[in-house]
Image (cartoon, helix red, strand yellow):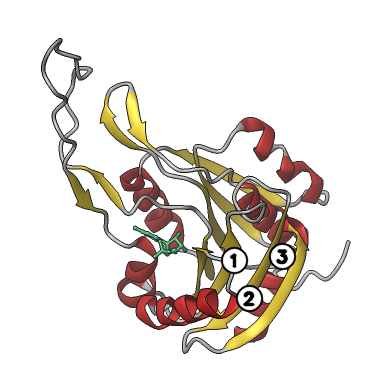
Amino acid sequence: AGAQDLAGRHVVVSAGGTREPIDPVRFIGNRSSGRQGVALAAAAAARGARVTLVAANVEDAVLEGLGAGRAGAADVSVVPVGSTAQLADAVHTAAATADVVVMAAAVADFRPEATPDAKIKKVPGRPPEPIRLVENPDILAGLARERRRAGQVVVGFAAETGDAAAGVLEHGRDKARRKGADLLVVNAVGAGQGFGTASNEVTVLDGAGEVVARAAGSKRVVADAVWDTVVKVSS
Ligand code: C5P
């Protein structure tokens, strides 16, 4: 085993992508596979943490990635969730005893205002009703600004599209300041990067938006770089 620098700590990782119901059979979702969150959970367990993985719609095949990092008695409990409301509940419950919370899940920004009990029907000759959206609460900002326990480290992820590295970072910097998290892991998505892919390239910003680390490689390599940074800021 490597360094047990998270021994005795409870860490919460959210992973995957939330799905907001439109009706009982349809949803608005996103392309997050949950691989980066699973890699974070596996890496934390290998470093000795007790891990709660709040997994939003993560396929079983992806959750198998927990196996690779499970060094002996390592400890990951998986809480499966679907919608943003469910994810918020599960994260809030686990965060109440956590030393570190990492929000790696892609959380839907909006949800349908109403969710009818019956499937929406197509009426011949009539145009579809628009789906009205309302904004979801920002779980990360709430954790960082309202719910934080003394000493708790709160980490966000920001998937930014665009290839101009400067623009991506600038966006990340604004987001870091706005959300109030201790660390924001910025990664570029699209064009073979990020969502659904095996590797990742990230820049870690502190709460002021300053660059504190960079990492590139497999999602496990990125995960360990994130934990290195967490250990550094919390020691
Ligand atoms: O603003 P944006 O969605 O890009 O921020 C991404 C970060 O915020 C991620 O850590 C994500 O888990 C978190 N988030 C959240 N609640 C939302 C939207 C995003 O916690 N409603």
Mark 1 neighbour class, 10 Å CA radius: few under 14, some 14 to 19, many 20 or more:
many
Are dots 2 and 1 in contact, CB under 8 Å?
yes
Q: Is residue 47 visible?
A: no
Provide the residue designation for mark 2: 203
First in sequence, mark 2 or 1: give its number: 1
Where is mark 3, residue-wise? 222
Q: Amino acid at mark 1?
A: Asn
Q: Secondary structure at mark 2?
A: strand
Give the vertical position of 85 relative to 233 (above or below).
above
Q: As shown in the figure, which amino acid type bears the numbered disc 2? A: Thr
User: In x, y percent, where is residue 23?
Assistant: 25, 26
Along the line of sight, the residue nearer the viewer: 52 or 35: 35
In three-dimensional space, the C-alpha distance between marks 3 and 2, rounded to whole angstroms, equals 10 Å
In the figure, is residue 162 to the left or right of 72? left
Circle 1 is placed at which residue position?
A: 187
Work out whether residue 147 or residue 103 is closer to the camera in this orientation and state it: 103
- As helix, strand or loop, the secondary structure at mark 3 comes to helix
Q: Quadrant of ligand 1?
A: bottom left
Q: Is residue 66 above or below residue 120?
A: below
Q: Position of residue 64 (x, y in %)?
A: 71, 37
Q: Is mark 3 within 8 Å of ligand 1?
A: no
Check whether the beta carbons of the residues at disc 1 and disc 3 lie within 8 A of each other.
yes
Quick one: label 1 or label 3, which is nearer the N terminus? 1
Dot 2 beta carbon under 8 Å from ligand 1: no
Residue 117 position, x and y percent, is 18, 22
Amino acid type indicated by mark 3 = Val
Location of residue 234 (image quadrant)? bottom right
Which image quadrant is residue 8 in?
Answer: bottom right
The residue shown at (73%, 72%) is 215
The N terminus is located in which quarter? bottom right
